Image (cartoon, helix red, strand yellow):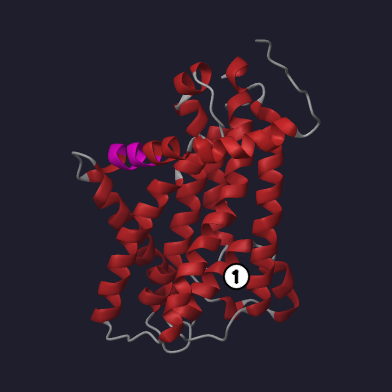
Amino acid sequence: MSQELVIEAGRSERQYWKDLWHYRELFLILTWRDVAVQYKQTVVGVLWAVLRPLLTMAAFTFVFAKVAKLPSEGGAPYPLMVFTAMLPWQLFSSAIATSANSLVANSNLVAKVYFPRIIVPAATMGVAMTDFVISFALLSAMMFWYQYVPSIQFFAVIPLTVLAAIVALGPGLILCALNVTYRDFRIIVPFITQFGLYLSPVGFSSSIVPEKWRLLYECNPMVGVIDGFRWAVLGSIAFPQRALLISVGCALFFLFCGIKIFRKAERTFADVI
């Protein structure tokens, strides 16, 4: 019995997205593996998820609150204001760092087996989300210590967390694709995240930014996410509507560009990796 092969424009692209669903178990396996490698039989992994935001919070509180005498958000304690901002920033920076190097780290799997390669950088989000959950538990303990009771808007943290992950995924896909061909990007990624840390309102309040620079400042997509977290957790600022709209727009734009660039480069991954 003969078989007929039909070549149809756009068919392979549609099949690719169907394959994502078909390989959903691989996504879960890779996610679980990355989390297990990070935390299984180790103390450093868990301690690092706690110490990194705590040490950064302590440094920013000393520099910005004690030395520079910058104001806090409303009546919130400065350490709590900084730590609230550290959660989405840590999620963003960790997701970009792990996704950018994910294909190179899984070169043997990529070179030998067919599956939609976009699964690999997407699966690395599991480690960043696990770190986020650990840090969020620490934030809850800090709120109890400072006797800070959240309001009903606290539940807005859930969609804001999803937004932070999407903001990271787009650039992560771009850097992941570039890192396969140009290994120099593994050196550039830490610089990008470190530079972005000081351009984002992690250690300071957005209220200190002059109004004439505010729109340009809000073009950083993490501004809306971080201020949204502070609005949801602390309730000490007004709802950052414009900044959040810009963040959503930037997240969707970079996600679209990331997928397009990744898909275009994906055809050569097995040859150059």
**Total marks placed:** 1
Magenta residues, as a range?
A: 31-37
- Kindly identify which residue carries mark 1: 224
Q: Name the residue rendered at 53%, 76% in the picture.
A: 205
Quick one: SS at disc 1? Answer: helix
- Quarter of the picture containing the N terminus is top right
- Judge from the rendering whether residue 66 lies leftward or rightward of residue 122; answer left or right: left
Amino acid carrying label 1: it is Gly
10 Å crowding of disc 1: few (<14), some (14-19), many (20+):
many
Residue 114 location, x and y as percent?
54, 23
Q: Characterize the magenta stretch by its predominant secondary structure.
A: helix
Q: Name the residue rendered at 64%, 65% in the picture.
A: 247
Residue 159 location, x and y as percent?
51, 68
Q: Is residue 91 above or below residue 201?
A: above
Residue located farthest toward the bottom when viewing the structure as drawn: 75
Q: Is residue 54 visible?
A: no
Residue located farthest toward the top when viewing the structure as drawn: 1
Residue 142, picture quadrant: bottom left
Q: Name the residue rendered at 62%, 39% in the picture.
A: 17
Magenta span includes 33 = yes
- Quarter of the picture containing the C terminus is top right
Seen from the viewer's position, the closer of residues 160 and 49 is 160
Q: Is residue 190 visible?
A: yes
- Judge from the rendering whether residue 25 lies leftward or rightward of residue 148; answer left or right: right
Q: Name the residue rendered at 48%, 34% in the picture.
A: 102
Q: Is residue 8 above or below residue 121?
A: above
Magenta span includes 241 = no
